[in-house]
Image: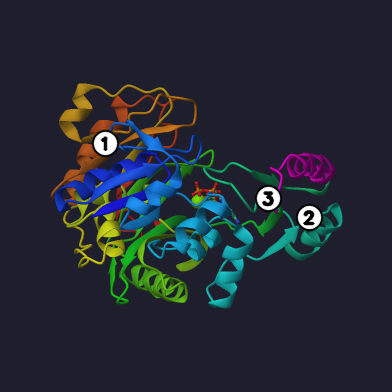
């Protein structure tokens, strides 16, 4: 079977690697250059989306910031999963918020901003501090502002106004103001749903960010109540979208209760641990779901944690002896994810030991969120005061 992925980054690459043993040939459409490429070798296979669509049995996407024309073309082919609607919702915070509200899924209170009067109304409604996020094109914390007090309102509005003026033509950009959530933790749930409505859902993952970029994901299994809560919300959203493929949902946890931060209609960075830590990884399960093959087990097979490699970083051989290293064949740039390290062990105690052996081998400036982490607390997802 031929699978066409919209987007030619590391997620398409990891789908191609996972698809090969199932004889699934994955090609990628680079939306920037308009080239069809091989996602592993980056070889250019030709130009033009139309022939790519024609040769594909199934089409999917590795990211949600894709032009509506491209999405419509793919949708018209009848081969696109999870499809135009899910990608459009994932790529526009207005649509995402409306989906969550309509599905009755808890999320942060918000107000839509187009003018400075809207910002004043948002302040009345939500108070300080608040987070302002661009509705379109945001990722890794880009297109976000934090507004803490009245004195910052004018300067923040000037920045936002300039941002809105420079939005690409034809895009209905705006800002979503969100109440600031003092969360205890950020977690995500990743799962597959197939066309029959069957699910395979992975264990909750705790995510630690620095400067808006995911740095560390820890698969945690001991908090059944939180897992169940997340799964209920996951199923409501996936069913509402009649979703087929891997869906990722990011949550804030406040006092043991979850609220949705955002959804990603695709395979997700916080699920990379499944490559070594689960029976069947998220990339294979995405392909299985969209190609109409049976879903594979999402069962966790061993304690796992994933560390993102961001920027110009070299990894020592010593780390390769202790953990799995996965490079994306990308030239380094500040803030760019170029690979990841997955630490897996048979037992939680061994994972803690290995993780603690690896941290001193990673430079603090290059891995800013890792030093000082108490990995044991994160692995169990227990409340901080439940630890001795
Ligand atoms: P991604 O790369 O995951 O798509 P993003 O840039 O699209 O991220 P968010 O996930 O909405 O945007 O925000 C990035 C991070 O900012 C969150 O992971 C969280 O740490 C913080 N954040 C976002 N919204 C809020 C909020 N309402 N209150 C507190 N912190 C928030
Ligand atoms: Mg996010």
Q: Is residue 257 left or right of residue 19?
A: right
Choose top left, top right, bottom left or bottom right for residue 44.
top left
Label 2 vs 1, first from the N-terminus: 2
Of circles 1 and 3, the one toward us is: 3
The magenta segment is 151-172
**Residue occupied by mark 1:** 356
- In percent of width and height, residue 70 lies at 52, 52
The Cα atoms of the two marked residues, 1 and 3, are separated by: 47 Å
The Cα atoms of the two marked residues, 2 and 1, are separated by: 47 Å
**Residue occupied by mark 3:** 171
- In percent of width and height, residue 96 lies at 57, 64
The Cα atoms of the two marked residues, 2 and 3, are separated by: 13 Å
Q: Is residue 294 above or below residue 133?
A: below
Instruction: Identify the residue shown where x is 32% and y is 73%.
Output: 195
As for residue 156 lying within the magenta part, the answer is yes
Q: Is residue 210 left or right of residue 216?
A: right
Q: Are marks 2 and 1 in contact (CB under 8 Å)?
A: no
Instruction: Identify the residue shown where x is 70% and y is 49%.
Output: 170
Of circles 2 and 1, the one toward us is: 2
Label 1 crowd bin: few (<14), some (14–19), many (20+), radius 10 Å: some
Label 1 vs 3, first from the N-terminus: 3
Instruction: Identify the residue shown where x is 38% and y is 55%.
Output: 60
Ligand 1 lies under 8 Å from the Cβ of mark 2: no
Q: Are marks 2 and 3 in contact (CB under 8 Å)?
A: no
**Residue occupied by mark 2:** 114
Of residues 42 and 73, the one nearer the viewer is 73
Mark 1 falls on what kind of element? Answer: helix
Q: Is residue 254 left or right of residue 142?
A: left
As for residue 13 lying within the magenta part, the answer is no
Label 2 crowd bin: few (<14), some (14–19), many (20+), radius 10 Å: some
Instruction: Identify the residue shown where x is 30% and y is 52%.
Output: 3
Mark 3 falls on what kind of element? Answer: loop
């Amino acid at each position: 079977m031929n699978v066409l992925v919209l987007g030619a980054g590391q997620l398409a690459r990891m789908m191609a690697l996972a698809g090969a043993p199932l004889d699934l040939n994955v090609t990628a459409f680079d939306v920037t250059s308009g080239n069809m490429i091989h996602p592993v070798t980056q070889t250019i296979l030709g130009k033009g989306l139309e022939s790519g669509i024609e040769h594909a049995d199934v089409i999917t996407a590795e990211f949600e910031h894709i032009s509506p024309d491209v999405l419509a073309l793919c949708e018209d082919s009848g081969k696109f999963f999870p499809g135009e609607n899910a990608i459009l919702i994932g790529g526009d915070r207005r649509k995402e918020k409306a989906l969550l509200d309509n599905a009755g899924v808890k999320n942060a209170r918000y107000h839509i901003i187009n003018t400075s009067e809207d910002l004043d109304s948002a302040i009345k409604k939500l108070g300080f501090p608040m987070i302002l996020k661009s509705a379109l094109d945001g990722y890794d914390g880009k297109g976000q502002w934090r507004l803490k007090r009245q004195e910052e309102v004018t300067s923040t509005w000037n920045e936002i106004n300039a941002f809105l003026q420079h939005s690409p033509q034809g895009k209905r950009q705006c800002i979503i103001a969100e109440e600031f959530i003092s969360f205890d933790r950020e977690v995500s749930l990743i799962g597959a749903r197939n066309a029959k409505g069957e699910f395979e859902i992975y264990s909750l993952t705790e995510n630690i960010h620095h400067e808006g970029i995911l740095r560390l994901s820890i698969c945690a299994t001991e908090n059944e109540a939180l897992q169940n809560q997340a799964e209920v919300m996951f199923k409501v959203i996936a069913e509402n979208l009649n979703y087929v493929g891997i869906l990722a949902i990011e949550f804030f946890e406040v006092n043991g209760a979850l609220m949705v931060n955002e959804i990603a209609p695709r395979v997700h960075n916080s699920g990379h641990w499944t490559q070594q830590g689960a029976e069947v990884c998220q990339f294979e399960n995405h392909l299985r779901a969209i190609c109409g093959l049976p879903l594979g087990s999402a069962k966790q097979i061993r304690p796992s944690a994933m560390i993102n490699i961001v920027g110009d970083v070299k990894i020592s051989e010593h780390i390769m002896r202790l953990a799995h290293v996965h490079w994306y064949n990308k030239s380094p740039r500040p803030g760019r994810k170029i690979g990841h390290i997955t630490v897996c062990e048979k037992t939680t105690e061994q994972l803690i030991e290995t993780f603690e052996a690896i941290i001193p081998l990673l430079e603090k400036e290059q891995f800013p969120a890792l030093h000082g982490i108490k990995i044991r607390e994160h692995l169990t997802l227990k409340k901080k005061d439940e630890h001795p």
